[in-house]
Amino acid sequence: MTTVTTRSGGDVLLTASDLDLDGQLVGPDDESYDRVRALWNGMIDREPGLVARCESVDDVRRSVRFAADLDLRLAVRGGGHNVAGTASVDGGLVIDLSAMNGVTVDPGAAVAAVAGGARWAEVDAATQEHGLAAPGGVVSETGVGGLTLGGGIGWLRRKHGLACDSLIGAQLVTADGGVLEIDENDHPDLLWALRGGGGGLGVVTRFDFELHPVGPEVFVAFVLYHGERAAEVLHAYRDYTTELDDEVSSFVILGTVPDEEDFPEDAWGEPYAMLMACAATTDLREGERLVQPLRDLGDPIIDMSGPMPYVDLQQVLDADYPDGLRYYWKSLHLPAMTDDVVELATEWADNRSSDLSTLDIWHLGGAMARVPADATAFGDRSAPYLLGVEANWEAPAQDEANLAWTRGCIEAFRQHSTGEEYLNFPGFFEGGDETRRAAHGAENYERLERIRRQVDPDGVFGSRPGPVG
């Protein structure tokens, strides 16, 4: 038996037999409970009353109705990171989709049907067999659901747009246990809302993506310069991105060289300014030409640039984000990389509370910026840069310092920003409605709330949801 908490704060005593699933129902008395309830972000230590490890759409339907009938607190877990921790809930029911991770590709139609618990590694492996890809993120272990529902900024953003821009259909289990097939013709408002709206409409059990020709190899710039040259590198990056072909998606990262054999031992522990770019062109020589300026600043710590299979590029950064590390990420859109922005970036990078933390500036624009703000729930795309402040650390004793560093950095940059945030880097949603309003824009936010009230009038999925994991 286990005690599960209702949304009103009451308790309900349940047994595993109360919810019949094809998958596994896990409670606190089960040996696997601590493993099953654990999230990727070690900062999040929630104790759900039950975890429904669904294996089918019918499992999801039964779990949703079970939660609705008993008025239980409910969270939905996809397949991946969920840095904000909204994929679990103390005392409530977690619908875990991670076992539902299949990917079916129709190469003739250039469409992939992706189950709700899949990760991008599974999508990349299946689609690259046909020389195709859906725009994902920059880490293969990221969940498809969370990234797409939050927008999805990745290596193909300037060439093919956000992940949510290639979402052409979905299957949604709604609060009443119904199953909706969604596309441009059927339930177009829901498709609009799923494109970067952050979830909370129901449980997405399938994502349908339009695929694009990519790879099998792309040319990648991957250069680390000495951290003392950070301002120089940032200025060079600003010049490089002023006029740039859509084929190139890139960012600059200020961090610390890890103690790993891939890097020169005499640089371990030293600050770096890293330039990384993907040239998504089939002509590798043209790709090399497009990213060459990033390699021409002289005297790098290391230059690991070259042709790379797209699936390998998607996995290059995986090791930097292991399960169980402690994470806190926030973001702001920047209208320009001014001298003040460069000065602040070097200052705050120099004062990081953890060597694992980074300060990142992503170049946006291209295909993702040509989508009107009201065409998807994601919102305005006009900012040319995104500031990502990633606090990553190991020890709980370092929590306060790392949270303070991230929040202080964001506040320092705020006057140089548009005020808009990226929904997948939201801190812990401590800003509540204002975080979402800042991500979507006021008009999109109001439209989203109207759609949520229509599809979930009783608030089964919570009145103020965040993306799934």
Image (cartoon, rainbow, N blue to C red):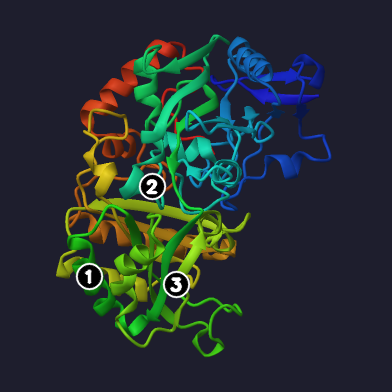
Q: Which element type, helix, strand or loop, lies under badge 2?
A: loop
- The local crowd at label 1, few if under 14, some if 14 to 19, many if 20 or more residues have their Cα within 10 Å, is some
Three-letter code, disc 1: Val
Residue at image position (58%, 64%) is 394
Q: Is residue 449 above or below residue 237?
A: above
At 41% from the left and 75% from the top, the residue drawn is 223
Q: Position of residue 277 (x, y in %)?
A: 37, 63
Q: Name the one closer to the observer, 398 or 143.
A: 143
> Which residue position is annotated with label 2?
153
- As displayed, is residue 417 above or below residue 204? below
Identify the residue shown where x is 38% and y is 80%: 225
Q: Nearer the viewer, mark 1 or mark 2?
A: 2
Residue 298: mark in rendering: none
User: Which numbered tag is attached to residue 342?
Assistant: 1
Q: Are marks 1 and 2 in contact (CB under 8 Å)?
A: no
* Residue of label 3: 305
In the image, 371: left or right of 452? left
Residue 184, position as x, y percentages in the image: 36, 18
